Structure formats: C-alpha cells, structure tokens
Amino acid sequence: MLAADPRTPNLYMVWTWRQGSRGDLDISFRASHDGGKTWNERRVLNADGPGTAHQIDPGIYLAPNGRIDIAWYDGRSSAVPVDPTSSDLKGFQDVYCTSSLDQGRTFGPNVLVSDRTIDDSIGVFANNVSSHYNIGLASTDERVWLAWQDYRTAAP
C-alpha cells in the first residue's frame, strides 16, 4: 500500500514482508521525503518480536494533519503455532494499529483494535478461499476508523 501526502513530497509505503525463507511475516514501512527519489531504511512496525506470529494485509491512511495511521491483521495472540515456512494463516488473528506524528520517523505503540479475535477456520478465511483484503482506514485529525473482515456472519 502506498500513501502520498498532498501537502509535502512525502510518500509512505507499507507491506507484508518475510525475513528470509524461515522468517515470519511482518509489517514493513518505508518513507520517502523527496517524492520517491530516496527511501529510508525498512522498519518493522509490529512489536511482537521475530518469529512469534504472522502479521498481514496492512492498510494506511494519512489524516489531514499529516498523521500516518497503519493497521493490520496480527496473529500474536493465536494459540496455533506459527509455521514460518508456510503462508498458511491458520489460527486466530486480531487487528492492531499504530500511528506516526513525525512523518514516519517514529511510531506509537501497537494498539489492539478488534473487540473479538478472528477465527481463520470459519468465514472469509476458510476453505482455501483466501478472500482476505487489506485493512481499510479513514482518518480525521482527531480519529481513525477501521474496517476489516471477520467471521461474525459465518456459520461453521
């Protein structure tokens, strides 16, 4: 996902990235402050530690005041162990977010947003359908709204 600040030459990029062939999936971020000519170093936004869980499908939105809001699906609370060699996302996920007030130089803590854990064995994540999409965000200077898929209307 890519976001452009209409008031500055700043560009912000967020994506899911795997460190090597045996790493878990993490949320990565880079910023350009010169219209994409150069980019800062990649940084991991999820703060769960390496190899503990997959984080996937980030969304990004810029508030009018320039705050960067980023959210993603996060498996850190899943009781199902992560197989870092697989992209099979069986288990449980929550939605987390973080924000930056200084053009992506630093980010606040990871904040749990979802009010119930998503079970990947039912609903849109089940039956090898793989119909999950990036988290949707919309922001004002005071708030951020998120939209995500979960299982609430699914039957096992």
Image (cartoon, rainbow, N blue to C red):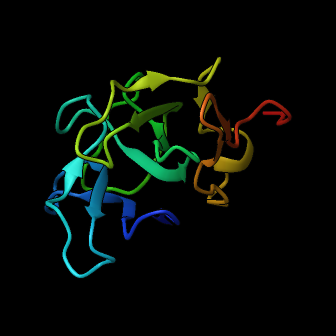
Name the residue at 86% across, 34% down: 153
Q: Is residue 1 visible?
A: no
Residue farthest bottom in this picture: 37
Nearer to me, 151 or 102: 102
Q: How many marks?
A: 0
In the rendered view of the protein, which quadrant contains the C terminus?
top right
Nearer to me, 102 or 137: 102
Compared with 52, 148 (above or below) is below
Name the residue at 36% across, 27% down: 76
Nearer to me, 139 or 66: 66
Compared with 19, 38 (above or below) is below
Residue farthest top in this picture: 115
Q: Quadrant of residue 33?
A: bottom left
Q: In which quarter of the image is residue 47?
A: top left
Q: Is residue 137 visible?
A: yes
Compared across the picture, whether 7 is left or right of 153 comes to left
Nearer to me, 32 or 122: 32
Q: Position of residue 14 (x, y in %)?
A: 39, 58
Q: Where is residue 35 in the image (x, y as percent from the top left)?
A: 33, 77
Q: Where is residue 103 in the image (x, y as percent from the top left)?
A: 33, 49
Q: Where is residue 96 in the image (x, y as percent from the top left)?
A: 48, 31
Name the residue at 23% across, 82% down: 37
